[in-house]
Image (cartoon, rainbow, N blue to C red):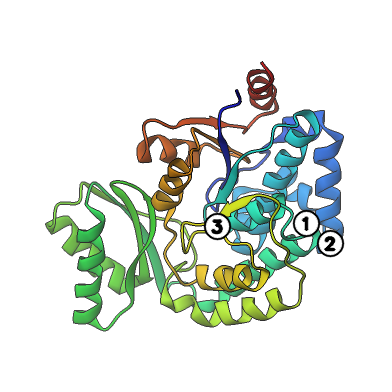
Amino acid sequence: MTTPTAFVFPGQGSQAPQMLSDYYQQSSIFRDTFAEASDALGFDLWDLIANGDQESLSLTANTQPVLLASSVAVYRVYTSLCNVKPAYMSGHSLGEFSALTAAGSIALADAVCLVRRRGELMQVAVPAGVGAMGAVIGLDDDVIVNTCLQVASQTGLVVEAVNFNAPGQVVIAGHKDGVAAAEVALKEAGAKRIMPLPVSAPFHTSLMEAAAQALGESLAAIEVSAPGLGVIHNVTADTENDPDSIRALLVKQLYSPVRWTECVQSMAAKGVECLVECGPGKVLSGLGKRIDKNLTSVSLGSYEALQTYITEVDA
């Protein structure tokens, strides 16, 4: 009997120069996927990975289509070699778009253009230097949420808990001075560490509402279908089949918290026993183990890892 599995798709932060190069060398399907994405965008997306530096790769408007194309390409290679479909899919922030594309809800050409637009909107929503994000380690979610609310009330600045990544790991974001004030208060409340994140804007905060409205206009112009299998959404930690509701959730996601802990718990409650990270890096594999120790986690970050996983699935 096949282990009930969910494929999960990484978000920003998992990109690196030369990532997945072994896939590009080994698989024509992987190369064809990048060619399709590049044609839609009008520039060579793989060249950014093969020859770009970390700085250019980390520009939000570049990162998002690069990661989406990478994750979808890995999934296409998997499906060409193995006919065992996952029970569910989900993705962290940007990764939700990858999951919907892999599940057949959005065409790849539309998706890469959409997330490039999403990245552009996020970059310009808040001027450089005005916003900040920080990862809070070792404090209960409720304490972080309430502390941010108190600091926001006292200062009149935006500071919110935005990524619930795993128990004891929550990201806060907002105005730079608001985040700084919250960090002081959170350390006083017992946070073990607070790590500033190297990002250009306060993602998933109310400061992104204008960007979200513009993203909604782009979403309205493309076809969205019911996904071919269940995709767990960041905003609700549950599935959705209605195309208009999917559009609305993708808009709301831009200015709402990523409820990743609940997404993983939701998949486990639906019977999932294994998380397969489909794309570069091992961020979500690590978080999955922290969220539910009964889940096994696999990363398909190399072609060799994919082959090993398929051998186990087919055994």
At mark 2, the secondary structure is helix
Residue that carries the numbered disc 3 in the rendered image: 239
Q: Amino acid at mark 1?
A: Leu
Residue name at image x 74 percent, y 54 percent: 104
Q: Is residue 178 above or below residue 111?
A: below
From the image, state whether disc 2 or disc 3 is nearer to you: 3
Task: Give the quarter of the image for residue 211.
Answer: bottom right
Quarter of the image that includes the N terminus: top right
Q: Secondary structure at mark 1?
A: helix
Residue, x 83% and y 41% (percent of image)?
A: 31
Q: Is residue 162 left or right of residue 284?
A: left
* CA gap, disc 2 and disc 3: 28 Å
Which quarter shows the C terminus?
A: top right
Q: Which residue matches tag 2?
A: 40
Badge number at residue 281: none
Q: Which residue is mark 1?
A: 108
* Disc with the residue nearer the chain's start (1 vs 3): 1
Q: How packed is label 1: few (under 14 Cα within 10 Å), some, or many (20 or more)? A: many
Q: Is residue 141 left or right of residue 293?
A: left
Task: Tell me residue 20's x, y (percent).
Answer: 69, 36
Residue 80 in picture, x, y percent from top left = 80, 34
Displayed quadrant of residue 196: bottom left
The residue shown at (51%, 67%) is: 253
The amino acid type of the residue labelled 2 equals Ala
Front residue of this view, candidates 65 and 222: 222
- Residue 298 on image: x %, y %: 54, 30
The residue located at (23%, 46%) in the rendering is 138
Residues under numbered marks 1 and 2 in contact, where contact means CB atoms less than 8 Å apart: yes
Decide which of 138, 220 is in the foreground and name it.
Answer: 220
* Dot 3: element: loop
